[in-house]
Amino acid sequence: MKTYTASSRRNLLGSIPGNLPGKLLGLFLVTVLTSSSAQLGSQIPVPAKTPDSPLLLIGARIHPVVGKVLEKGELLIVDGKIAAIGQSVKRPDKVQTVDLTGLDLYPGLIDAHTCLGLVEVNAVRSTRDLDETGDLTPEVRALISINPESMHIPVTRSNGVLTVLTIPQGGLVSGRSGLMSLEGWTWEHMSVRTTVGIHVRWPRMSLPEKEEERKKARKARDAKLDKIRELFSQARAYGAARKSRPDTQQRDLALEALQAAIRRQEPVFLHANGFREIRAALLWAQEARLRPILVGGLDAARLTDLLQRMEVPVILTGINRIPLRRDDAYDTAFSLPRRLQKAGIPYCIAGKDTPFEVANIRNLPYEAGRAVAYGLSPEEALRAITILPARILGIDDRQGSLEVGKEATLFAARGNILEVTTPVLAAWIPGRPLDLSDRHKRLYRKYRKRVEGKAVEGKRKD
């Protein structure tokens, strides 16, 4: 996938011919954008090296997430892991000290639902690698397709989002998602977990009111449901055949990809928002003896009994959104985290579930901040984008909180990260200091100079 970054050393827009016909302008832009990646790629920050000596962060207000906040605490990083944390830790020899007085230290934020690395400019087809042809593509692995040079990666991590689940799109069974940290040369270097689970996009269950349309819609819906059921049924039979006749049973990559889900070693992510879709998807997962995770879940609060009985966690894809139905309360999505917490449903807050939102993954803390305004405590909101997604995704032994033995994936900010005005000033993945420069900051510096120039020009006399 080719990458375009708008912050070139020369003004890219200045190269557009002024007399270019309108019909050709779009084609010219696409050609320029896709052909400029080589010369602009150097503006993606170079991955950092692991420090030669231990690193001691001092003076910060430390938010462990799983414990009390430490005022002016200290955190020691050795070989990329947290070796000690407290008010005063023992200093090893040749330690590098970083003074973070006045800043807040947080574990890296985790977004459990993104297309990061799979789409660059959504309007340009050649920069989208989101899905494969066909409705059933379980063999697809999203992580091996990501673009490490994506301009969205530096922008995202500049706001504290340091780990994301990148998900394939399209079809009914889209493929397997992968968990990656936002720093590294290649997808292998960035991988936290190459595959996390299979993603099933449940068909819409409601039907039109007109009888003629209902029959057609019902037939199409039932055909999709049969495809999903038949695929998992075939996968179970295939697994039994491979076990009993490993030498004679021909390999099938699609059915092979479902074996971890069939054996409940990996979860099945069920994408559904409406009441009917959620209920139908969960009952199917129960019948198929799978380990489901609900994704979307805007109507999840209406099915808390079923979710509790099946012990199904929920990944909420966006809090800043409108309700599903016109007669729903305006704050249906805003208050959903609080309602799930009160019901004892495991949940986390993620970004919105469309490819168009890949540029806005950095807004994850503000999704959680919205929930604070509608009943969720600030401490719980922070947990909803750190330790809670880590538990759902199975990496809470490595990330999600600041504890001894965990990876030193963390960042320092000036203030409450849930507030829009809070800047992130430093970050480490894991233990490697990040270059937090990005396209937004370069454009800010560039156009600030223009504004300063205008102010000078305004003093001239005619």
Image (tube, rainbow, N blue to C red):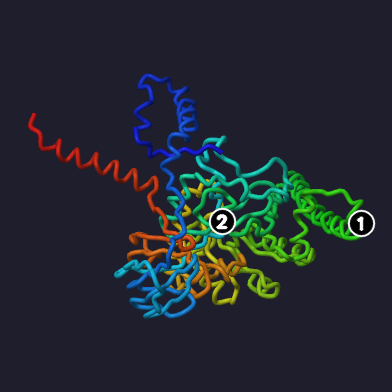
Left or right: where 43 falls relative to 235: left
Residue 386: give x, y in percent of width and height: 50, 67
What kind of element bears circle 1? loop
Q: Earlier in the sequence, mark 1 or mark 2?
A: 2
Image point (49%, 45%), residue name = 150
Q: Tell me which amino acid carries mark 1.
A: Arg
Crowding at mark 2 (Cα within 10 Å: few <14, some 14-19, many 20+): many
- Residue 384 to residue 236: above or below: below
- Residue at image mark 1: 245
- Using a 10 Å C-alpha cutoff, classify the residue at mark 1 as few (fewer than 14 neighbours), some (14 to 19) or many (20 or more): few
Residue 299 position, x and y percent, is 60, 64
Regarding mark 2 in the picture, which secondary structure is present there? strand
Image x and y of residue 227, in percent: 79, 50
Pick the front one: 318 or 114: 114
Q: Is residue 313 visible?
A: yes
**Is 96 on the left or on the right of 286, as rendered?**
left
How far, Cα to Cα, is label 1 from label 2? 36 Å
Which corner quadrant holds the C terminus? top left
Q: How many marks?
A: 2
Q: Is residue 459 left or right of residue 100?
A: left
Residue position marked by numbered label 2 in the rendering? 180
Q: Residue furthest front?
A: 93
The amino acid sitting under disc 2 is: Met
